Image (cartoon, rainbow, N blue to C red):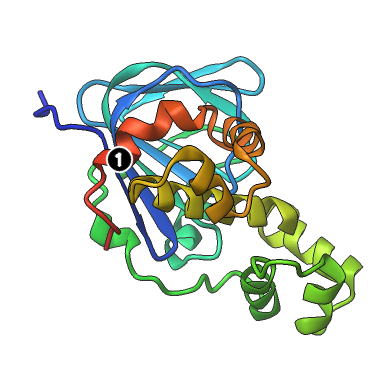
Amino acid sequence: MAEYREPSFGVGAGFARYRGPAFDTAAHCHAAFQIAIALDGEVAMVDADGECHRGAALVVPPMARHRMLAGTDLVTFFIEPHSAFADRLRGLCGDGVTVVDELRDLDEAEVRSGLPSRAIDPRLLAAMDAVTTPGWSMPEVAARVGLSPQRLRALARRQLGMPLPRWRVWVRLRRTAEALGAGDSLADAAVAGGFADQAHLSRWMREMMGLTPTETLPALRARPGRAG
């Protein structure tokens, strides 16, 4: 049986990592691949059709709606779709929750390269970076990378499986998580992440993580710092 540790959360280039107990969550969908690895027993998720999946390691692609079931100690990686390790995951998982037991011994060093994905168009990579600039509209982002708004929208849906505004919200959640981990109040962390207020943050965190900011605080405040 795995030794129990206090919940922890860390963020690295292109990924985030959580270690701690699995909680019952609301149905939600991430803007990243999720790898959930049970350290003792199995991890369980319910997909959008109500089917329960159990295994030593489960993978969920971006924007696949699901909910986590409460369980024992686990390690969860959130792999951003433009990172190099995401290329491996594209070949392992389907459109929904997939049991991938070969990832049960995945080590953080394997996801830590920080290199961009070979499967993502360089113009889209540039747009993913530009879209996080405060105040920039989608037409301005498209013009910066030399695409029409329509072509950029189609490229994002084809290669990321999501519209760029969803990616922008994910980056804001990541920034908020880092601020909370640094000790900021919920209100200040919401502003640091680019949300209008705490209620705005809560709505989006529940939509994309299945949890409220208050529910995530124990792990965020216990984290040792940036992963990698």
Per the image, the residue denoted by label 1 is 221
- Residue 192 position (above or below residue 69): below
- Residue 153 position (above or below residue 58): below
Q: Nearer the viewer, residue 198 or 104?
A: 198
- Classify residue 28 as left or right of residue 15: right
The image quadrant where one finds the C terminus is: bottom left
Image coords of residue 193 (percent x, y) = 56, 53
Amino acid type of the residue tagged 1 in the rendering: Arg
Image coords of residue 208 (percent x, y) = 59, 37
- Residue 152 position (above or below residue 178): below
Q: Secondary structure at mark 1?
A: helix
The part of the image, by quadrant, that contains residue 158 is bottom right
Q: Residue at x 65, y 57 (%)?
A: 168
Q: Residue at x 82, y 67 (%)?
A: 137
- Classify residue 40 as left or right of residue 65: left
Q: How many marks?
A: 1
